[in-house]
Image: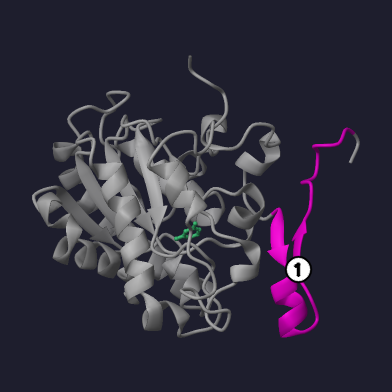
Protein backbone atom coordinates (compact mmCIF):
# COMPACT_ATOMS: atom_id res chain seq x y z
CA UNK A 1 0.00 0.00 0.00
CA UNK A 2 1.27 3.47 -0.84
CA UNK A 3 0.85 5.65 2.21
CA UNK A 4 0.35 9.42 2.16
CA UNK A 5 2.74 9.75 5.11
CA UNK A 6 6.13 8.40 6.13
CA UNK A 7 5.63 5.30 8.30
CA UNK A 8 8.91 6.08 10.08
CA UNK A 9 11.48 3.66 11.36
CA UNK A 10 9.43 0.53 10.95
CA UNK A 11 12.17 -1.85 9.86
CA UNK A 12 15.70 -2.98 10.61
CA UNK A 13 18.44 -1.89 10.66
CA UNK A 14 16.88 1.57 11.01
CA UNK A 15 14.93 0.74 14.17
CA UNK A 16 18.09 -0.27 15.98
CA UNK A 17 20.01 2.67 14.57
CA UNK A 18 17.39 5.08 15.91
CA UNK A 19 17.25 3.26 19.21
CA UNK A 20 21.01 3.52 19.59
CA UNK A 21 21.46 7.09 18.37
CA UNK A 22 24.50 8.70 19.99
CA UNK A 23 23.85 11.35 22.61
CA UNK A 24 25.96 13.90 24.43
CA UNK A 25 28.92 11.57 24.96
CA UNK A 26 29.49 11.70 21.19
CA UNK A 27 27.80 14.99 20.27
CA UNK A 28 28.88 17.56 22.91
CA UNK A 29 26.42 20.25 24.01
CA UNK A 30 29.13 22.83 23.33
CA UNK A 31 29.03 22.18 19.58
CA UNK A 32 25.56 20.73 18.93
CA UNK A 33 21.98 21.54 19.89
CA UNK A 34 21.58 18.08 21.38
CA UNK A 35 18.61 19.28 23.42
CA UNK A 36 16.46 19.20 20.25
CA UNK A 37 17.04 15.51 19.71
CA UNK A 38 18.50 13.56 16.79
CA UNK A 39 16.87 13.93 13.37
CA UNK A 40 17.72 11.01 11.16
CA UNK A 41 16.72 11.23 7.54
CA UNK A 42 14.06 11.93 4.90
CA UNK A 43 12.93 9.66 2.08
CA UNK A 44 12.79 5.98 1.30
CA UNK A 45 14.17 3.33 3.62
CA UNK A 46 12.53 0.46 1.72
CA UNK A 47 15.35 -0.07 -0.81
CA UNK A 48 13.55 1.92 -3.52
CA UNK A 49 15.87 4.96 -3.34
CA UNK A 50 17.87 5.62 -6.53
CA UNK A 51 19.92 8.51 -5.17
CA UNK A 52 21.46 9.29 -1.82
CA UNK A 53 21.83 12.96 -0.89
CA UNK A 54 24.06 13.93 2.02
CA UNK A 55 23.19 17.21 3.71
CA UNK A 56 24.82 18.97 6.62
CA UNK A 57 22.79 19.37 9.81
CA UNK A 58 19.16 19.91 10.76
CA UNK A 59 17.88 23.41 11.51
CA UNK A 60 14.70 24.76 13.09
CA UNK A 61 12.12 23.47 10.57
CA UNK A 62 13.63 20.01 10.82
CA UNK A 63 13.50 20.13 14.62
CA UNK A 64 9.74 20.63 14.42
CA UNK A 65 8.95 18.14 11.64
CA UNK A 66 11.50 15.46 12.70
CA UNK A 67 12.72 14.88 9.15
CA UNK A 68 15.76 16.47 7.51
CA UNK A 69 15.91 19.01 4.70
CA UNK A 70 12.39 20.39 4.96
CA UNK A 71 13.20 24.13 5.25
CA UNK A 72 14.77 26.43 2.65
CA UNK A 73 17.60 24.01 1.88
CA UNK A 74 15.11 21.16 1.64
CA UNK A 75 12.94 22.88 -0.97
CA UNK A 76 16.03 23.58 -3.05
CA UNK A 77 17.10 19.94 -2.83
CA UNK A 78 13.56 18.79 -3.69
CA UNK A 79 13.69 20.89 -6.87
CA UNK A 80 17.11 19.43 -7.72
CA UNK A 81 15.71 15.91 -7.38
CA UNK A 82 12.74 16.84 -9.56
CA UNK A 83 15.15 17.81 -12.35
CA UNK A 84 16.45 14.24 -12.21
CA UNK A 85 12.92 12.84 -12.47
CA UNK A 86 13.06 11.70 -8.85
CA UNK A 87 9.73 12.48 -7.23
CA UNK A 88 9.91 9.69 -4.64
CA UNK A 89 12.92 7.41 -5.04
CA UNK A 90 15.51 9.22 -2.96
CA UNK A 91 16.96 9.10 0.51
CA UNK A 92 18.52 12.03 2.36
CA UNK A 93 20.91 11.71 5.30
CA UNK A 94 22.75 14.54 7.06
CA UNK A 95 26.41 14.69 8.07
CA UNK A 96 25.28 15.43 11.63
CA UNK A 97 22.34 14.06 13.60
CA UNK A 98 22.03 17.27 15.60
CA UNK A 99 22.04 20.93 14.67
CA UNK A 100 25.54 22.44 14.77
CA UNK A 101 25.95 25.17 17.41
CA UNK A 102 28.61 27.83 16.96
CA UNK A 103 31.01 28.63 14.15
CA UNK A 104 33.52 25.84 14.46
CA UNK A 105 31.43 22.86 15.60
CA UNK A 106 30.92 21.39 12.15
CA UNK A 107 34.50 21.54 10.91
CA UNK A 108 35.96 20.48 14.21
CA UNK A 109 33.75 17.43 14.69
CA UNK A 110 32.86 16.15 11.23
CA UNK A 111 34.93 13.01 11.44
CA UNK A 112 35.05 12.47 15.20
CA UNK A 113 35.26 8.68 15.50
CA UNK A 114 31.86 8.26 17.20
CA UNK A 115 30.08 10.64 14.82
CA UNK A 116 31.63 9.07 11.73
CA UNK A 117 31.07 5.49 12.90
CA UNK A 118 27.35 6.02 13.49
CA UNK A 119 26.90 8.00 10.26
CA UNK A 120 28.73 5.25 8.35
CA UNK A 121 26.23 2.71 9.65
CA UNK A 122 23.40 4.81 8.21
CA UNK A 123 25.18 5.23 4.88
CA UNK A 124 25.84 1.49 4.68
CA UNK A 125 22.25 0.72 5.63
CA UNK A 126 20.76 2.83 2.85
CA UNK A 127 23.26 1.64 0.24
CA UNK A 128 23.41 -2.05 0.97
CA UNK A 129 20.28 -2.92 -1.02
CA UNK A 130 22.12 -1.90 -4.17
CA UNK A 131 19.35 0.26 -5.68
CA UNK A 132 21.12 3.60 -5.24
CA UNK A 133 22.66 4.70 -8.52
CA UNK A 134 24.32 7.97 -7.47
CA UNK A 135 25.36 9.99 -4.44
CA UNK A 136 25.36 13.78 -4.02
CA UNK A 137 27.07 15.64 -1.20
CA UNK A 138 25.67 19.10 -0.57
CA UNK A 139 28.50 21.12 0.95
CA UNK A 140 32.05 20.57 2.10
CA UNK A 141 31.19 18.79 5.33
CA UNK A 142 28.99 16.31 3.49
CA UNK A 143 31.86 15.68 1.08
CA UNK A 144 34.18 14.99 4.00
CA UNK A 145 31.60 12.61 5.44
CA UNK A 146 31.41 10.69 2.16
CA UNK A 147 35.21 10.57 1.75
CA UNK A 148 35.57 9.23 5.30
CA UNK A 149 32.92 6.61 4.55
CA UNK A 150 34.82 5.45 1.47
CA UNK A 151 38.00 5.14 3.54
CA UNK A 152 36.25 2.71 5.85
CA UNK A 153 33.23 0.39 5.52
CA UNK A 154 32.07 2.23 2.39
CA UNK A 155 34.95 1.32 0.17
CA UNK A 156 32.78 -1.18 -1.69
CA UNK A 157 30.69 1.81 -2.88
CA UNK A 158 33.61 3.76 -4.35
CA UNK A 159 32.42 3.02 -7.90
CA UNK A 160 29.08 4.80 -7.40
CA UNK A 161 28.67 8.00 -9.38
CA UNK A 162 29.37 10.80 -6.94
CA UNK A 163 28.98 14.59 -7.14
CA UNK A 164 29.99 17.19 -4.58
CA UNK A 165 28.07 20.44 -5.04
CA UNK A 166 27.73 23.63 -2.97
CA UNK A 167 25.32 23.43 -0.05
CA UNK A 168 21.88 24.81 -0.98
CA UNK A 169 21.98 27.66 1.53
CA UNK A 170 25.70 28.43 1.20
CA UNK A 171 24.94 31.64 -0.77
CA UNK A 172 23.11 33.09 2.25
CA UNK A 173 25.33 31.36 4.79
CA UNK A 174 28.33 33.44 3.83
CA UNK A 175 26.38 36.67 4.54
CA UNK A 176 26.83 39.92 2.63
CA UNK A 177 24.67 42.21 0.52
CA UNK A 178 21.83 40.91 -1.70
CA UNK A 179 23.99 41.35 -4.80
CA UNK A 180 26.70 39.15 -3.31
CA UNK A 181 24.15 36.49 -2.35
CA UNK A 182 22.75 36.63 -5.86
CA UNK A 183 26.23 36.20 -7.37
CA UNK A 184 26.92 33.21 -5.11
CA UNK A 185 23.52 31.72 -5.95
CA UNK A 186 24.29 32.03 -9.64
CA UNK A 187 27.69 30.35 -9.16
CA UNK A 188 26.09 27.58 -7.12
CA UNK A 189 23.50 26.92 -9.82
CA UNK A 190 26.24 26.66 -12.45
CA UNK A 191 27.79 23.90 -10.33
CA UNK A 192 24.40 22.25 -9.79
CA UNK A 193 23.72 22.31 -13.54
CA UNK A 194 27.03 20.52 -14.20
CA UNK A 195 26.21 17.90 -11.56
CA UNK A 196 22.74 17.35 -13.06
CA UNK A 197 24.33 16.30 -16.36
CA UNK A 198 26.47 13.69 -14.59
CA UNK A 199 23.69 12.47 -12.33
CA UNK A 200 21.14 12.06 -15.10
CA UNK A 201 23.52 9.65 -16.81
CA UNK A 202 23.85 7.65 -13.61
CA UNK A 203 20.20 7.58 -12.54
CA UNK A 204 18.88 4.94 -14.90
CA UNK A 205 15.55 4.43 -13.12
CA UNK A 206 13.94 7.82 -12.50
CA UNK A 207 10.33 7.96 -11.29
CA UNK A 208 9.39 10.23 -14.17
CA UNK A 209 11.12 10.83 -17.48
CA UNK A 210 11.71 14.59 -17.69
CA UNK A 211 13.76 16.69 -20.11
CA UNK A 212 16.79 18.30 -18.48
CA UNK A 213 15.90 21.88 -17.65
CA UNK A 214 18.95 23.64 -16.25
CA UNK A 215 18.71 26.34 -13.62
CA UNK A 216 18.95 29.98 -14.65
CA UNK A 217 20.65 32.66 -12.55
CA UNK A 218 18.36 32.19 -9.56
CA UNK A 219 15.70 29.79 -8.31
CA UNK A 220 12.38 30.03 -10.16
CA UNK A 221 9.32 29.41 -7.92
CA UNK A 222 8.66 26.13 -9.78
CA UNK A 223 12.14 24.97 -8.74
CA UNK A 224 11.17 25.10 -5.06
CA UNK A 225 8.48 22.41 -4.77
CA UNK A 226 6.68 21.42 -1.60
CA UNK A 227 8.02 18.58 0.48
CA UNK A 228 5.86 15.51 -0.31
CA UNK A 229 3.45 14.36 2.38
CA UNK A 230 4.81 10.81 2.07
CA UNK A 231 8.16 12.05 3.43
CA UNK A 232 6.73 13.39 6.69
CA UNK A 233 5.17 11.84 9.78
CA UNK A 234 1.42 11.16 9.75
CA UNK A 235 -0.61 14.22 10.58
CA UNK A 236 1.96 16.83 9.56
CA UNK A 237 -0.09 19.88 8.53
CA UNK A 238 0.22 20.75 4.83
CA UNK A 239 1.63 24.24 5.51
CA UNK A 240 4.72 22.65 7.08
CA UNK A 241 5.46 21.15 3.68
CA UNK A 242 5.26 24.49 1.88
CA UNK A 243 7.36 27.59 1.85
CA UNK A 244 9.76 27.76 4.77
CA UNK A 245 9.86 30.64 7.23
CA UNK A 246 7.24 29.26 9.60
CA UNK A 247 9.89 28.30 12.18
CA UNK A 248 12.52 30.61 13.63
CA UNK A 249 14.87 30.68 16.57
CA UNK A 250 13.78 33.58 18.75
CA UNK A 251 14.99 35.04 22.03
CA UNK A 252 16.74 38.11 23.36
CA UNK A 253 19.84 36.26 24.53
CA UNK A 254 21.94 33.52 22.97
CA UNK A 255 20.72 30.91 25.43
CA UNK A 256 17.04 31.91 25.07
CA UNK A 257 17.45 31.68 21.30
CA UNK A 258 18.96 28.25 21.66
CA UNK A 259 16.03 27.18 23.84
CA UNK A 260 13.27 28.62 21.67
CA UNK A 261 11.87 27.78 18.24
CA UNK A 262 8.83 29.88 17.40
CA UNK A 263 6.42 28.20 15.00
CA UNK A 264 3.92 30.46 13.22
CA UNK A 265 1.01 29.23 11.10
CA UNK A 266 1.41 31.14 7.80
CA UNK A 267 -1.03 33.77 6.58
CA UNK A 268 -4.14 32.43 4.91
CA UNK A 269 -4.20 28.99 6.54
CA UNK A 270 -6.84 30.01 9.06
CA UNK A 271 -9.76 31.48 7.08
CA UNK A 272 -9.78 35.25 7.28
CA UNK A 273 -6.34 35.42 8.88
N1 LIG B 1 18.58 21.15 6.98
C1 LIG B 1 19.08 19.91 6.93
O1 LIG B 1 18.47 18.97 7.43
N2 LIG B 1 20.26 19.72 6.33
C2 LIG B 1 20.94 20.70 5.78
O2 LIG B 1 22.00 20.47 5.23
C3 LIG B 1 20.40 22.01 5.83
C4 LIG B 1 19.21 22.19 6.44
Where does residue 173 sit, x and y in percent of width and height? 48, 73
Where 266 sits versus 181, above or below?
A: above
Residue that mark 1 sits on = 260
User: Outermost residue toward the left?
Assistant: 159
Asked which secondary structure carries label 1, the reply is loop
Where does residue 212 sit, x and y in percent of width and height? 25, 36
Q: 220 or 158: which is nearer to us?
A: 158
Which image quadrant for residue 252?
bottom right
Q: 186 or 206: which is nearer to us?
A: 206
Judged left or right of residue 164, residue 91 is right
Judged left or right of residue 200, residue 73 is right
Q: Image point 31% across, 32% down: which residue?
A: 47
Judged left or right of residue 7, residue 88 is left
Name the image quarter holding the C terminus. Answer: top right
Q: Image point 32% across, 65% down: which residue?
A: 117
Judged left or right of residue 125, residue 22 is right
Q: 221 or 243: which is nearer to us?
A: 243
Asked whether residue 138 is in view, the answer is no
Which image quadrant for residue 43?
top left
What range of the chain is rendered magenta?
246-271
Asked if the magenta segment contains residue 267, the reply would be yes
Q: Image point 53% across, 21% down: which residue?
A: 3
Where does residue 215 sit, x and y in percent of width and height? 34, 48
Where does residue 161 sit, x and y in percent of width and height? 14, 48
Q: Image point 47% across, 56% down: which residue?
A: 20
Q: How many marks?
A: 1
Asked whether residue 273 is in view, the answer is yes
**Dot 1, crowdedness within 10 Å: few (<14), some or many (≥20)?**
few
Asked if the magenta segment contains residue 19, the reply would be no
Amino acid sequence: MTLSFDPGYDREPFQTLCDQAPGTAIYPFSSFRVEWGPIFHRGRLDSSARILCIGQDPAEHEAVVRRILVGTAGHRVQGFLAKLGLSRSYVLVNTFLYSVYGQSGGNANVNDPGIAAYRNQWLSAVLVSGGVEAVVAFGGLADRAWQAFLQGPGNTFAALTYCHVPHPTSPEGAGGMPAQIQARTQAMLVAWNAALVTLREAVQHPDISVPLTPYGDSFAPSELPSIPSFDLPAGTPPWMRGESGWAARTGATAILKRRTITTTVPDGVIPGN
